Amino acid sequence: MGTESAVNGGEGFPEGEGPAPVVPDVWRVGLLPHEDARGRFVEGFHQERFAAVSGRLMTVRQVNYSVSRRGVVRGVHYFAGPGGQAKYVTCVSGEVLDVAVDLRAGSPTYGRWESVLMDASRPRAVHVPVGLGHAFVALSGEAVMLYLCDEPYVPGLERTVHPLDPELALPWPGGLDLTLSERDRSAPSLEEARADGLLPPYPS
């Protein structure tokens, strides 16, 4: 299904922050690095500031990070019911292409996605609410992604849609030898997940 976002057209991540143009429930966060002779300091998350600009309450109850080699794809992961996690994600080392997908059955932006290049040298973050899927591919030799989550992870509640599903047509760059986990490799397509009642509903 894809998206028409300028982000996916190669213009890069817009400076500043706000709702994404194609899937506005995805919130883009502008991060300002402070650099001097010692290196760089970044305020990655400020709860009160984020709430003030986005109108969203993001209480952090779990922090995770992943380390991925070039070509590793993680996702598309999501939660369909109670116990899900909203995620605030950023790349703290290396470079990734990050993708958020609207998987909510009945949503006006169902099946559409937003993508953004995340490079630790130009820090930025994305807030992905419950009901949307999240995925990324590592573009550098090694990439570290940091995830702030509003709820603790509950084993068995997370689901996945196949990241190479042609209906989604996610914008994975060519020339990469993609590596998927066994769970993601055997995940259903978007249509299969919908037919089996596995997708989250769009709030009425």
Image (tube, grey):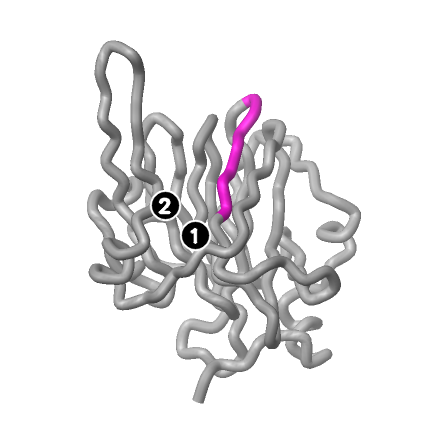
Q: Main secondary structure of the magenta part?
A: strand
Q: Which residues are magenta?
A: 141-147
Residue 3, image x, y percentages: 40, 60
Residue under label 1, please give it.
88
Q: Nearer the viewer, residue 55 or 48?
A: 48
C-alpha gap between disc 2 and disc 1: 7 Å
Label 1 Cα neighbours within 10 Å, binned few <14 / some 14-19 / many ≥20:
many
Mark 1 lies on a secondary structure that is strand
- Tell me the residue at 55%/34% (across/down): 138
Mark 2 lies on a secondary structure that is strand
The quadrant of the rendering that contains the C terminus is bottom left
- Seen in the picture, residue 107 relative to 26 is either above or below; the reply is below
Residue 181, image x, y percentages: 74, 44
Q: Furthest-top residue in view? A: 37
Magenta span includes 184 = no
- Tell me the residue at 29%/12% (across/down): 38
Q: Nearer the viewer, residue 54 or 8?
A: 54
- Tell me the residue at 49%/40% (across/down): 146
Q: Nearer the viewer, residue 189 or 204?
A: 204
- Seen in the picture, residue 106 relative to 98 is either above or below; the reply is below
Amino acid type shown at disc 1: Tyr
**How many callouts does the rendering have?**
2
| In this picture, residue 42 sits left or right of residue 85 | left
The disc at residue 72 is none
The disc at residue 125 is 2
Amino acid type shown at disc 2: Ala
Asked if marks 2 and 1 touch (Cβ < 8 Å), the reply is yes
Residue 14, image x, y percentages: 24, 45
Residue 25, image x, y percentages: 36, 67
Which of the two labelled residues, at mark 2 and mark 1, occupies the earlier sequence position? 1
